[in-house]
Image (tube, rainbow, N blue to C red):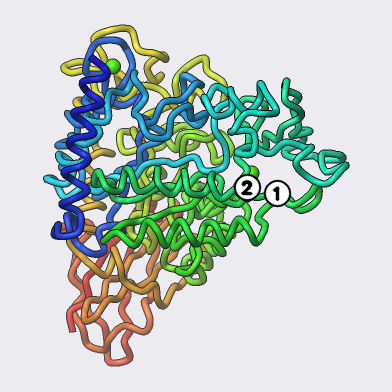
């Protein structure tokens, strides 16, 4: 059974390889500036009643994502892994995890997503494999294994190389039958030896494998950790940047592909067009949440960040990792108005926004889990067609009955409105960020692209605010886009307009010359 599926998938791949050179672009240029959904496949939709989400389940929810206004999907790791949870301990870089489906299911998901104008990128774990990976099983059992030089062993380096290391408060060296090996992220995840050209060739071919199938790009995991030089110089080394550059170039040798890097320490460096091109704006999410909670300093910090950041930043409110913060709904303790402000603070701003699955529903964490586990629960679809017919792999969210995709859910409607603006007004998706003004708890800015000029005003305060907008085109009409039936306004001959923004709300105007 498995063999015949693999053969079918291989035949399908062969077809897509040949078609690749002549194939027209599947997605519109600039598609990656639409909003992405970060999806934990295990928690999204189960199709076969085993209580575990899978690719066919996700494919059956593509209409929901399209209807919401999503333009891209980031799949957390979907290839075979040994951790039975997040998937970052890879055991096979070229086969889908059996509990998620087959490579043919992946090809199906890509086709169905493209039909709906949605691009799909997947996590690729470049720094390490699982200790269960057959390569490491060989490398760690015998010094004679052909795979031993695929990993970092202390005796392959200068004497004393493994002495005196502390990485994330731990000694990253672990014993094995074949000597001590390096595991920056722990014993279960041995680091690849990226100085070995065979390792680089293997991963470059794996990246090509999924691109040839039609994948629209990658989220490259932990790239500043590819190469370590010594006990002191192990983070963000020049060699790691050079490899990241090379991978980005390889991926973007295919048309309309998007790459985003996880580079927690120096994300702005990694978002440079000649390095990764895009990187997660770690840190910004704390300020957005604080701003939406009414912290004036944070409001200024958000405006300053957008004014200074490269266009390729990937923004978010939270993600699958506890260090990035709890689920947004939990951080706001269910305060719908502040949750909306946080959403507007990144979905109407520059960069590529990544919504964490369920955020748009106001989904809370899974009960009784560790800090990471509570973030990765089953999606709150509602009872009519739930996540699974079987007991789920992890308990449903604490508010799955109150906040789901089927019940009357004003927050979901609001996310649709924001994404409709992003998709309908190119200045919001791709325009410059200009003329930011901050006064206390009120922030406004203009987004401009070609002739299109859009003004966004956010009032994080509990009182209505009168904002005097400056530097507008003189004597222009301001047409309200949010709320849809809002009062219009006009700028005077000095390019000023006075707008009243209700408490805890966002207003969007299109400026017509
Ligand atoms: Ca399943
Ligand atoms: Ca490494």
User: Residue 34: x percent and y percent?
Assistant: 27, 56
Left or right? Give the position of 386 relative to 243. left
User: Residue 42: x percent and y percent?
Assistant: 36, 23
Q: Residue furthest bottom?
A: 493
- Disc 1 residue crowd, few under 14, some 14–19, many 20+, Cα 10 Å: many
Q: Residue furthest top?
A: 390
Answer whether labels 2 and 1 touch (C-beta < 8 Å): yes
Q: Could you tell me which residue is drawn at 23 percent across and 67 percent down?
A: 426
**Badge 1 is on which residue?**
228
Image quarter where the C terminus lies is bottom left
Residue 489 can be seen in this image:
no
- Residue 335 versus residue 109: which sits nearer the camera? 109
Residue 424 can be seen in this image:
yes
Relative to 178, does residue 439 appear above or below in the rendering?
A: below
Asked whether mark 2 and ligand 2 are closer than 8 Å, the reply comes as yes
Q: Could you tell me which residue is drawn at 58 percent across and 22 percent down?
A: 137
Left or right? Give the position of 128 relative to 86. right
Asked whether mark 1 and ligand 2 are closer than 8 Å, the reply comes as yes
**Secondary structure found at label 1:** loop
Q: Could you tell me which residue is drawn at 54 percent across and 41 percent down?
A: 324
User: Residue 48: x percent and y percent?
Assistant: 22, 13
User: Residue 357: x percent and y percent?
Assistant: 35, 35
**Badge 2 is on which residue?**
225
Q: Nearer the viewer, mark 2 or mark 1?
A: 1
Left or right? Give the position of 508 relative to 165. left
């Amino acid at each position: 059974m498995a063999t015949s599926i693999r053969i079918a998938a291989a035949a399908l791949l062969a077809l897509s390889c040949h078609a690749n050179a002549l194939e027209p672009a599947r997605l519109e240029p600039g598609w990656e500036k639409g909003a992405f959904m970060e999806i934990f496949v295990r928690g999204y939709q189960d199709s076969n009643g085993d209580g575990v989400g899978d690719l066919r389940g996700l494919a059956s929810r593509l209409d929901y994502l399209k209807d919401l206004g999503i333009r891209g999907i980031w799949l957390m790791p979907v290839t075979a892994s040994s951790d039975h949870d997040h998937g970052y301990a890879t055991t096979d870089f070229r086969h889908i995890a059996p509990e998620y489906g087959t490579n043919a299911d992946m090809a199906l998901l890509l086709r169905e997503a493209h039909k709906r104008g949605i691009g799909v990128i997947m996590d690729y774990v470049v720094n390490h494999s699982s200790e269960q990976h057959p390569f490491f099983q060989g490398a760690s059992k015998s010094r004679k294994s052909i795979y031993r030089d695929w990993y970092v062993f202390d005796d392959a380096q200068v004497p004393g190389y493994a002495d005196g290391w502390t990485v994330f408060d731990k000694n990253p060296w672990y014993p094995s039958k074949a000597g001590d090996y390096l595991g920056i992220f722990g014993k279960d995840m041995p680091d690849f030896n990226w100085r070995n050209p065979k390792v680089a060739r293997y991963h470059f071919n794996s990246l090509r494998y999924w691109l040839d199938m039609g994948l629209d790009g990658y989220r490259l995991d932990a790239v500043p950790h590819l190469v370590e030089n010594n006990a002191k110089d192990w983070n963000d080394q020049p060699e790691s940047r050079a490899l990241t550059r090379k991978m980005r170039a390889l991926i973007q040798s295919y048309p309309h592909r998007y790459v985003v890097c996880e580079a927690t320490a120096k994300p702005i460096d990694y978002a440079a067009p000649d390095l990764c091109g895009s990187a997660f704006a770690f840190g910004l999410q704390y300020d957005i949440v604080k701003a939406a909670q009414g912290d004036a300093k944070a409001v200024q910090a958000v405006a300053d960040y957008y004014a200074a950041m490269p266009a390729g930043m990937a923004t978010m409110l939270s993600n699958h990792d506890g260090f990035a913060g709890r689920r947004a709904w939990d951080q706001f303790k269910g305060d719908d108005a502040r949750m909306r402000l946080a959403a507007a603070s990144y979905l109407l701003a520059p960069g590529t926004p990544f919504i964490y699955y369920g955020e748009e529903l106001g989904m809370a964490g899974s009960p009784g889990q560790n800090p990471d586990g509570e973030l990765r629960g089953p999606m709150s679809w509602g009872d009519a067609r739930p996540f699974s017919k079987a007991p789920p792999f992890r308990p449903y969210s604490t508010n799955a009955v109150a906040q789901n995709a089927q019940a009357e859910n004003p927050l979901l409607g609001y996310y649709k409105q924001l994404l409709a603006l992003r998709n309908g007004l190119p200045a919001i998706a791709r325009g410059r960020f200009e003329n930011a003004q901050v006064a206390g708890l009120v922030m406004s800015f203009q987004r401009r692209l070609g002739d299109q000029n859009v003004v966004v005003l956010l009032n994080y305060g509990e009182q209505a605010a009168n904002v005097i907008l400056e530097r507008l085109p003189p004597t222009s009409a301001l047409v309200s886009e949010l709320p849809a039936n809002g009062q219009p306004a006009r700028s005077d001959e000095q390019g000023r307009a006075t707008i009243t923004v209700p408490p805890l709300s966002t207003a969007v105007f299109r400026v017509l010359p």
